[in-house]
Each structure stands twice: as C-alpha cells, then as structure tokens.
Amino acid sequence: MEGLVRSSVNYVPLSPISFLERSALVYQDRPSVVYGTIRHTWGETLQRCTKLASALSQLGTSYGDVVAALIPNIPAMYELHFGVPMAGGILCTLNTRHDSAMVS
C-alpha cells in the first residue's frame, strides 16, 4: 500500500463502534466474551451494547457527556467500552484498585 493515496476504496478507519458492528457481521456466532460461565457471541454483544446505549440515551446521556464507571474488569466493563460511545458519551473508567485520593 506504500505510495497509494488514502481513499474510501483502500482505507477505512476503525472506531470501537465500527469494529463491533463489523465483528458482529463477520463473526456473529463466534465468542466475543468468555468469563467463567458467561459466554457471549459477537452478535449478542452488539445487541447488548445497543440496548445499553439506548438505556443511557433514555437517561439523558448525549454527545460529549462523560460517563464514569467504578467497576472491575468484567464483561459489563467491556460492554461499556462500546455502549457509551454508541450513546455519544465519553467513558471514564475508574479502576477498583485505585486509592480514594485517585478516585476522587
């Protein structure tokens, strides 16, 4: 691809949302999450994240709003990484291992 001019024919930037949509289209029945007994396919993950984005929008989240989450690295955190941008928000993840001064 060296020497080629970028155009819509040979270059499409990925975003978390376009990555999820493409993965759900191409790998719909393949696993996207395996966490203990929890298993979700790419198709299920897209559906869950779309529902999350809808719920956030109904709660008033709009473009540019910051959504903070204090949650361990579990499937819900994974879904927040897709669902919050789908609702137009910005995700601010707070690690449960941070001390109180860092979290505040």
Image (spheres, rainbow, N blue to C red):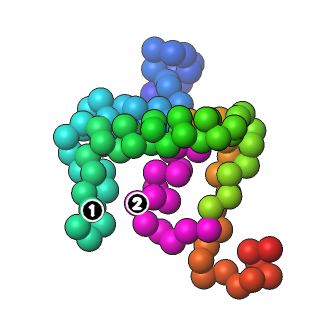
Tell me which residue sits at (38%, 38%) in the image. 46
The quarter of the rendered structure image containing the N terminus is top left
Q: Is residue 43 above or below residue 79?
A: above
Tag on residue 75? 2
Point out the tag, 1 or 2, that comes first from the N-terminus: 1
Q: Residues within 10 Å of mark 2 (few under 14, many from 20)?
A: some
Q: Which residues are magenta?
A: 70-84
Proximity of marks 1 and 2: CB atoms separated by less than 8 Å:
yes
Residue 51 position within the rendered picture, expressed as x and y whole percent measured from the top left: 45, 38
Q: Secondary structure at mark 1?
A: strand
Depth check: 20 or 43 in front?
A: 43
Amino acid on which disc 2 is placed: Pro
Magenta segment main secondary structure: helix
Inspect this view and state whether residue 85 appears. no
Q: Which residue is mark 1?
A: 38
Residue 81 position within the rendered picture, expressed as x and y whole percent measured from the top left: 53, 50
Residue 90 inside the magenta-drawn segment: no
Tell me which residue sits at (62%, 68%) in the image. 70
Tell me which residue sits at (56%, 21%) in the image. 6
Name the residue at the bottom extreme. 99
Tell me the quarter of the picture where residue 92 sits. bottom right
Residue 72 position within the rendered picture, expressed as x and y whole percent measured from the top left: 51, 72
